[in-house]
Amino acid sequence: MYTDKAKKLADTAVQEQATGSAVLAAKHMLEATKLMHMAKEKKVRALKVRALAERLNSQVLPSYKQAVDIAGLHASFSGLQTSQQRHRLLRKKT
């Protein structure tokens, strides 16, 4: 978005320079330069956010999945114990 607008402004500045509108051309070229700088800053920031997200995906999510798996095993084991206890109680009653 920023780079596209900057390129359009730079093209406009070149045309203005060719027609003798040096002041307007300089203004548009300066604005185009600022937009390119902003685009570069946003790209650097986006790459940092992406790196953070990739780190989280590789470190935190596996731990979360492991915790879910362990909780599932615990629930299954608890259910098995409850079932065995109920079975024992039923055998004692008979």
Image (cartoon, rainbow, N blue to C red):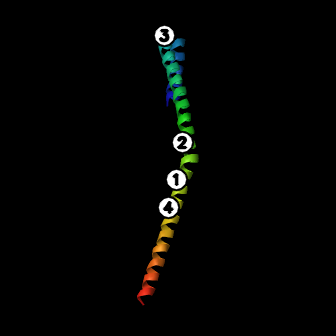
Q: Nearer the viewer, mark 4 or mark 2?
A: 4
- Asked if the residues shown at circle 2 and circle 3 are in contact, with their CB atoms under 8 angstroms apart, the answer is no
Residue at horizontal 48 percent and vertical 69 percent from the top: 78
User: In the image, residue 53 lies at what x, y percent?
Assistant: 54, 42
Q: Which residue is mark 2?
A: 53
Instruction: Measure the C-alpha gap from mark 2 to mark 3.
Output: 47 Å
N-terminal of the pair, mark 3 or mark 1, is 3
| Mark 2 neighbour density, 10 Å: few (under 14) some (14–19) many (20 or more) | few
Residue flagged by tag 1: what amino acid is it? Tyr
Q: Residue under label 3, please give it.
A: 21
17 or 68, which is in the foreground? 68
Which residue is rendered at x = 52% and y = 56% of the image? 67
Q: Residue furthest bottom?
A: 94
- Residue 74 picture location, percent across and down: 50, 65
Numbered tag placed on residue 85 in the rendering: none
Q: Is residue 32 above or below residue 87?
A: above
Q: Secondary structure at mark 4?
A: helix
Residue type at mark 3 is Ser
Element carrying mark 1: helix
Which tag, 3 or 4, sits closer to the chain's start? 3
Nearer to us: label 2 or label 3: 2
Cα distance between the residues tagged 4 and 1 = 10 Å
